[in-house]
Image (cartoon, rainbow, N blue to C red):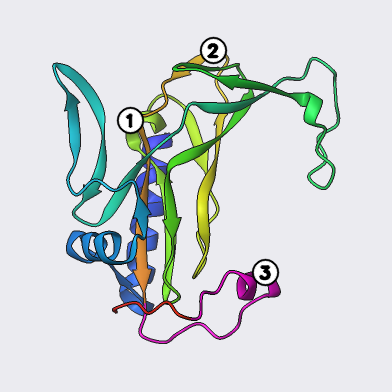
Amino acid sequence: MHDTIYKGILILFLYISTKTMTIKSDNWIKQMANDHKMIEPFTESQIRKNGDQDLISYGTSSFGYDVRCANEFKVFTNINSAVVDPKNFDESSFVDLESDICIIPPNSFALARTVEFFRIPRNVLTICLGKSTYARCGIIVNVTPLKPEWEGHVTLEFSKQPHFQQRFMPMKALLKWFFSSQMKIVTNLTKTDQENIKANWRYPS
């Protein structure tokens, strides 16, 4: 079911993009990463093996970039029976973990960050989807779109609904980013957006 939802969202995004914006290909992604440091660290091709070990592929694909998850996690625990308030989240509800393996308890979630650092051009919006490899395991990925000229490591949210524990390993690809752009430059920016603008940056279309 999760794999079907993943494909449906991707099809919808591709349809909307063909009507209003252009999804960028691997050549554009490589140019932006190499010339403007849009993604750091950056891998120009899909990496599927580490020696004899098979990997969940990461790096540049034909239309997108597969990012990796760092090994720093905040795993939600309900041991204190806390009320979850988005405006006042109780930090005691999280267990900090730095490990090569993260176990998500049933009906819980974990927060993490990308290995990669992003610098998004002013005429670009990015959409992120979880890889189908994990969707078929029941892991739901939620990441906000990256707005024009946003910079930083991206916070990742992984939720686990089925009633069994789920293991996933950092430094492996978990998500795919799509870059979509249009010729018109964004003018309707919030104060937070404006604070992120680098006036001396110039990007090829």
Q: In this view, does 185 lie above or below 89?
A: below
**Could you say which is closer to the camera, residue 194 or residue 4?**
194
**Could you say which is closer to the camera, residue 112 or residue 36?**
36
For image coordinates 17% across by 26% down, the residue present is 49
Q: How far apart are marks 3 and 1 (CA)?
A: 35 Å
Q: Distance between the residues labelled 2 and 3?
A: 40 Å
Q: Residue 74 at x, y = what percent?
A: 63, 27
* Number of other residues with Cα within 10 Å of mark 1, as a class: few under 14, some 14 to 19, many 20 or more: some
For image coordinates 41% across by 24% down, the residue present is 137
Q: Is residue 74 left or right of residue 153?
A: right
On the image, numbered disc 1 is attached to which residue?
Answer: 133
The reply to whether callout 2 and callout 3 are in contact (CB within 8 Å) is no
Pair 2/3: label in front: 3
On the image, numbered disc 2 is attached to which residue?
Answer: 164
Query: Of label 2 and label 3, which has the lower sequence position?
Result: 2
The reply to whether callout 3 and callout 1 are in contact (CB within 8 Å) is no
Q: In which quarter of the image is the N terminus?
A: top left
Judging from the image, what secondary structure is the residue with disc 3 in? helix
Q: Is residue 204 left or right of residue 93?
A: left
Q: In the rendered image, which quarter is residue 184 located in? A: bottom left
Q: Which residue lies furthest to the left in this view?
A: 52
Q: Name the magenta segment's main secondary structure.
A: loop
For image coordinates 49% across by 70% down, the residue present is 148
Q: What residue type is labelled 1?
A: Thr
